[in-house]
Image: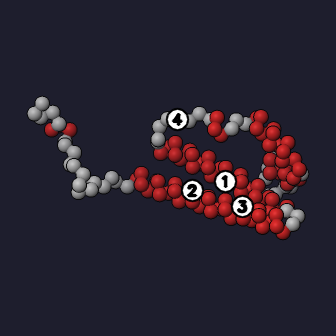
Amino acid sequence: MCGPPAARCGSFVDTLWRDPGAAGELTRKRSLMMPAADDRTRTAGGDAGDLGLLFHRLNNQLGIILANAELLEAKSADEMARARAAQVVASVLDAMTTAREIRLRFRRRQTQPVRRRRSDPVPAAPHCQNIGQ
């Protein structure tokens, strides 16, 4: 086994597990090889699929932050650094829970029928719209 159980051999987390000082070099390499998230093309529509993709990307990014915070917590030499890393872990878990709740509420809203209020005008039937013109 080359690092933490969740890390693949040669991965970013595995390399940090073996050599925490390698973070700067790995980040530079990754930034050259991978485009920034803001450079990705986006569709102009407001589809539920677009929102689903954004939630997926958000969850992936939060997972990366969580993995790194857990790694820092496990490898920290002093108690103060461990406490800070534990706070980041707790905050990321809260953020993941919030993102999931937003996604579920949005999904419920999409599946519920639209309710009309009494004050809303009743739409005319399509076959009656041309009468009187």
Q: CA distance from mark 1 to mark 4?
A: 23 Å
- Horizontally, residue 112 falls left or right of residue 131, namely right
Please give the residue where the numbered disc 4 appears in the rendered image.
Answer: 43
Task: Indicate the position of residue 57 as horizontal and vertical percent values.
Answer: 62, 46
Q: Residue at x 62, y 62 (%)?
A: 94
Could you tell me the amino acid type at mark 4? Thr
Question: Marks 4 and 3: which is nearer the front?
Answer: 3
Asked which secondary structure carries label 2, the reply is helix
Please give the residue where the numbered disc 1 appears in the rendered image.
Answer: 62
Asked which secondary structure carries label 4, the reply is loop
Which of marks 1 and 2 precedes in the sequence?
A: 1
Task: Indicate the position of residue 100 as horizontal and vertical percent values.
Answer: 56, 57
Characterize the local packing of mark 1: few (<14), some (14-19) or many (20 or more) Cα atoms within 10 angstroms.
some
Which of marks 4 and 1 precedes in the sequence?
A: 4
Which of marks 3 and 1 precedes in the sequence?
A: 1
Could you tell me the amino acid type at mark 2? Ala
Asked if disc 2 and disc 1 are in contact, CB closer than 8 Å, the reply is yes
Numbered marks: total: 4
Q: Which labelled disc corresponds to residue 88? A: 3
Q: Residue at x 52, y 54 (%)?
A: 103
- Picture quadrant of residue 117: bottom left
Q: CA distance from mark 2 to mark 3?
A: 16 Å
Question: Marks 1 and 3: which is nearer the front?
Answer: 3
Q: CA distance from mark 4 to mark 3?
A: 32 Å
Which of marks 4 and 2 precedes in the sequence?
A: 4
Asked if disc 2 and disc 3 are in contact, CB closer than 8 Å, the reply is no
Please give the residue where the numbered disc 2 appears in the rendered image.
Answer: 99
Q: Residue at x 62, y 35 (%)?
A: 40
Task: Indicate the position of residue 124 as horizontal and vertical percent values.
Answer: 19, 43
Q: Is residue 10 visible?
A: no
Q: Quadrant of the N terminus?
A: bottom right
- Horizontally, residue 101 falls left or right of residue 25, namely left
